[in-house]
Image (cartoon, grey):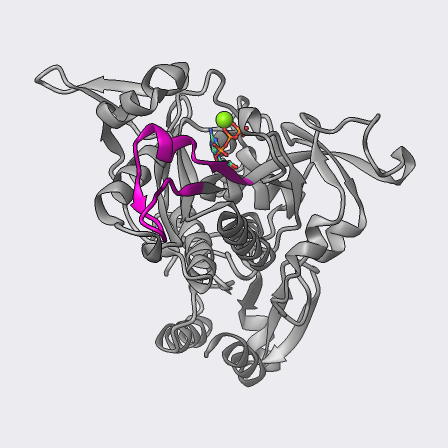
Amino acid sequence: MRRSTGFFPTQKEAPREAQIISHQLMLRAGLVDQHCSGIYTWLPLGVRVLKNIETIVRQEQDKIGAQEILMPTIQSADLWKESGRFDAYGDEMLRIQDRHGRDLLYTPTAEEVVADIARKHLKSYRDLPALVYQIHWKFRDEIRPRFGVMRGREFLMKDGYSIDRDEASARASYKKMMTAYVRTFRRLGLTAVPARADTGPIGGDLSHEFLIVAQTGESELFYEERLEGLMANNEDGKDDVDVDDILNIYAATDEIHDPKTCPIPAEKLKVARGIEVGHIFYFGTKYSEALNVNLAGQDNKNIIPHMGSYGIGVSRIVAAIIEASHDDRGIIWPESVAPYKIGLINIRVKDKACSKVCDELYNDFQNAGIDVIYDDRDERPGTKFADMDLMGIPYQISIGPRSLEKGTVEFKNRKTGATEELTLAEVTTRIKKRFVT
Ligand code: ATP
Ligand code: MG
């Protein structure tokens, strides 16, 4: 994309109401525009990041055999009245009436709809296990929307649901999903700690929140430090995950952590603040019972399936990545989610020879299918460098008349800040080797 013709509204200063760094940088880099409290328009650069995250989430869901569906965002209240949640959900649920006075709502989650699909379309225990997910918008009328998309009212969520014949099978689905989560967060360049979380009235040990350790996190967690190593991205890209190993290491949210009963001595525990980016939950027959999901069991006895639900805060993750990866110049995107992999800077647009080389390189990358943003504006070089860093572009190539005289270009790594003088041929080969598959 050419900067001169594209829509990339960057800003030098962040509005004063943006309190945390991710919110400031998302506004400054032109990722989002606030529409009203807790509701945002995603601008071109932001959409590209969101899509990249979605793709990783989707691939890892598909890999464990989950199937993608799309449920309505506006739902009939009838199912929610059956489950009792139309009233119980409280003020976070946005209730609407249509022209006939029928109650509708904007979906804050979708257990009821999944249970309804199950009772209509699944006949017997042989149809189980079933694992479905969607990546779709949710609305929760949060009492205090804040920190930009971190706690919005409208937000993008991956919500997955498992349906199993019994608890043992549900436990297996839960672990499968946990495996997918570990792989997903690794690929997103995040170290997410799976902390045991409150299961509410259902009890049991099957609820985990995935938390990114960050000062600005709204949750508190206690965990053994060695868990971080297991969860982190390993350099060689291996996707081995031993869920039982992970489950054996202590980590808990403050809601359930009790120093009196904790098996790990306090001095061996890390206490930190965390951003909740995912939540997995086994809730037994709560919704299948409420909605009368009955399937034929083995010996002609009916069974009520066991369910679980599995959320990932896709739009919140954009902010969480920035909280975890930035410097005083701006965002530092992990390659996997970067809106463009390559930033090409034409230092002197008015210099014909320089523009010719830049245009050719740009076309070459475009034809090779490489995501490149080309700053071909007639602006000061300093402005262009600052914008590329603000937008977090991982690899930046700068070309000006002076370097061309020497037959070289400057190649910069955003993350390390290291720069190299390379010939055009060297830079082209290196980038194609890395990004053409
Ligand atoms: P929180 O405690 O942060 O309100 P939650 O427990 O209500 O989260 P879930 O119902 O488990 O969240 O939803 C799944 C995921 O959706 C969360 O882990 C989080 O990443 C994301 N999420 C929840 N609420 C919001 C919100 N208001 N804005 C952005 N993302 C959200
Ligand atoms: Mg909430």
**In the image: residue 86, left or right of residue 206:** left
Identified at 32% across, 40% down, the residue is 114
Q: Position of residue 184 (x, y in %)?
A: 54, 56
Q: What is the quadrant of the N terminus in the image?
A: bottom left
- Residue placed most toward the observer, 133 or 306: 306
Q: Position of residue 377 (x, y in %)?
A: 41, 56
189 in the magenta segment: no
**Residue placed farthest to the left in the image?**
100
- Residue placed most toward the observer, 142 or 292: 292
Q: Which residues are magenta?
A: 278-307
Identified at 88% across, 33% down, the residue is 266
Identified at 36% across, 21% down, the residue is 85
**In the image: residue 59, left or right of residue 420:** left
299 in the magenta segment: yes
Identified at 9% across, 18% down, the residue is 99
Q: Classify residue 430 by image quadrant.
A: bottom right
**In the image: residue 321, left or right of residue 437:** right
Compared to 219, does 404 lie above or below? below
Q: Position of residue 315 (x, y in %)?
A: 45, 41
- Residue placed most toward the observer, 128 or 316: 128
Q: Position of residue 364 (x, y in %)?
A: 40, 78
Q: Is residue 385 visible?
A: no
Q: Classify residue 67 by image quadrant.
A: bottom left
